[in-house]
Amino acid sequence: MSNGMRVDLSALDEVIRKLWSLLDDMDKAGTTSRYDTEISPDAFGQASDFVEARELHSAQGEMKVKIEGIIKKLHDLIDDFSTKTSKVRDKYNDEEHEIKHSMGGDSGGSPKGRLAE
């Protein structure tokens, strides 16, 4: 910040927009995994005809829960990163405004051009 380097706030804005888009996608994936992946026990065959049907249905249920957990963890990670990126962007923006203000940027002139009060 004060080391003479500039931060491209528009690039940070773009990262934040992409993270929000990714969060939307994760929300959709979470909804899909929760509600659209339920398979009825009969889909694996009748237990009387196919002994492993119950076992397959149980395995599918366990995998469904694991996938939901993975999606939740990814969502939380992306949300955390998005929040932190937004905070960093806000701090850089605030500092940029403070520097402009202290250099007379808000008045259209420089501090050297001001009359002493």
Image (cartoon, helix red, strand yellow):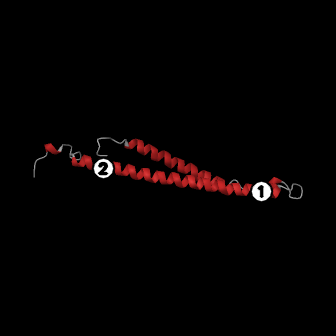
Q: Which residue is mark 1?
A: 57
Residue 11 horizontal/vertical position (percent): 41, 41
Q: Amino acid at mark 1?
A: His
The secondary structure type at the circle numbered 2 is helix
Q: Is residue 77 left or right of residue 43?
A: left
Q: Earlier in the sequence, mark 2 or mark 1?
A: 1
The secondary structure type at the circle numbered 1 is helix
* Distance between mark 2 and mark 1 Cα atoms: 57 Å
Q: Is residue 32 left or right of residue 74?
A: right
Q: Few, some or many C-alpha atoms within 10 Å of disc 2 (few <14, some 14-19, many ≥20)?
A: some
Q: Is residue 22 left or right of residue 2?
A: right
Q: Nearer the viewer, residue 107 or 14?
A: 14
Q: Amino acid at mark 2?
A: Glu
Q: Nearer the viewer, residue 80 or 112?
A: 80
Q: Nearer the viewer, residue 59 or 94?
A: 59
Q: Few, some or many C-alpha atoms within 10 Å of disc 1 (few <14, some 14-19, many ≥20)?
A: some
Residue 51 quadrant: bottom right
Task: Say which residue appears at 49% left-offset and 45% top-offset.
Answer: 18
Task: Say which residue appears at 29% left-offset and 48% top-offset.
Answer: 97
Residue 14 horizontal/vertical position (percent): 44, 43
Q: Which residue is mark 2?
A: 95
